[in-house]
Amino acid sequence: MAKAALRERGLLSVWFDPDTVWQAGKTGKRGRPEAFSDAAVQVCLTLKVLFGLPLRQTVGPVESLIRVAGLDWPVPDYSTLCRRPVRLGVQIPCRSSGRPSNLLVESTGVNFRGDGDWPARKHGPSRRRQWRKVHITMDTETGDIRAVEFPSSRQGDSPLPPDLLAQIPEDEEVATVTTDGADDTRRCHGAIISRGAEAIIPIRRNGRAWKEDCPAASVRNEILHAMRHLGRALWKTWAGSHGRTRVEARMNRVTLLGERIMSRDPNRQTAEIQIRILRRFIRTGGIHRLSHEPLLCPRHGRDRGHRLNDYQTGELQPQC
């Protein structure tokens, strides 16, 4: 079953729905109307990102596919594909599991200017190398990407989780939010508590207790109290923090298309990253469900000497 699913991922079948709105309609606004819809531009950019083609070489494959499909559709010019990503609204589809969402947050860096890895290793990094970070939020139940942020390289990681949660609909219930220790801040804990969710964030190694002047501080101090009694490794296993490995694997699929983006404009870079994340390889041959229940038994031998008796009542006693 898994091997057949992996073979299906490599199929080059492309379907064009004849009912697709390929050409843009009239908007009633002043000025020349656009010739192609956002869906048409998104299809062309998807093929561009998938095969790593420049803009001019993208027009040829799209024209051939439309001709093979027997459709009489015009093909966007390379100049159109260059201008439209600035204001293109890429729609990332998602499925509803019918249950409260368990969200995983992960980030990585992509290079868009400067030397490659080999010149940097051979001659040292150049000052012209510039990076941007990609932050994604994944639902453990469906495996879908629910939120994407692509900030500038000067912005840190900690301000991003509240912006990612803001992309989740308000009427959708969120159960847990799992991220790394870089997001151990009052703003992140407060944003998670405001959504009625549980924060699974490991405390930094030099972290101290906060003054309990808000609900976020109380929850964070409980995590710190548990980590001091159980140890960092056992707490991660018990709380389910190791579930982040799944979103790390999903991020690896995004970077398999290359750790360099071709666009230079920030808005075009955002559209290119969203097109990458739009790939639906997770729908075929992926893990359909990841249990988020805490593990009852430790996985590591060094943690077998400690056991959680009753965390809810505050009785954290090591037991051999």
Image: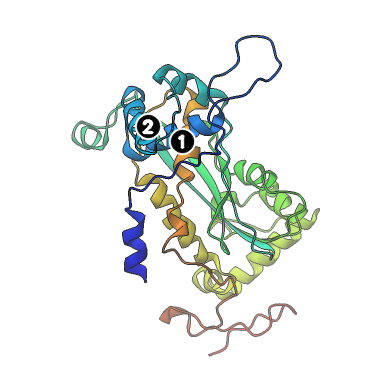
| Secondary-structure class at tag 2 | helix
Q: Residue at x 50, y 60 (%)?
A: 244
Percent from the top left, x then y, of residue 147?
A: 59, 46
Residue type for callout 1:
Val
* Chosen colour scheme: rainbow
Q: Residue at x 34, y 24 (%)?
A: 127
**Outermost residue to the top:** 31
Kindly indicate the quadrant of the structure image that contains residue 180: bottom right
**Outermost residue to the bottom:** 320
Disc 1 to disc 2: CB gap under 8 Å: yes
Would you name the residue on which mark 1 appears? 43
| Residue situated in front as seen by the camera: 1 or 104 | 1
Percent from the top left, x then y, of residue 23?
A: 55, 26
Q: Residue at x 42, y 54 (%)?
A: 281
Instruction: Point out which mark residue 34 bears.
Output: none
Would you name the residue on which mark 2 appears? 62
Q: Residue at x 70, y 81 (%)?
A: 315
Horizontally, residue 287 falls left or right of residue 115, namely right
| Secondary-structure class at tag 1 | helix
The quadrant of the rendering that contains the N terminus is bottom left
Location of residue 257 with respect to 285 vertically, above or below: above
Percent from the top left, x then y, of residue 297?
A: 52, 83
Location of residue 126 with respect to 311 vertically, above or below: above
Q: How many marks?
A: 2
Q: Is residue 212 visible?
A: no
Q: Earlier in the sequence, mark 1 or mark 2?
A: 1
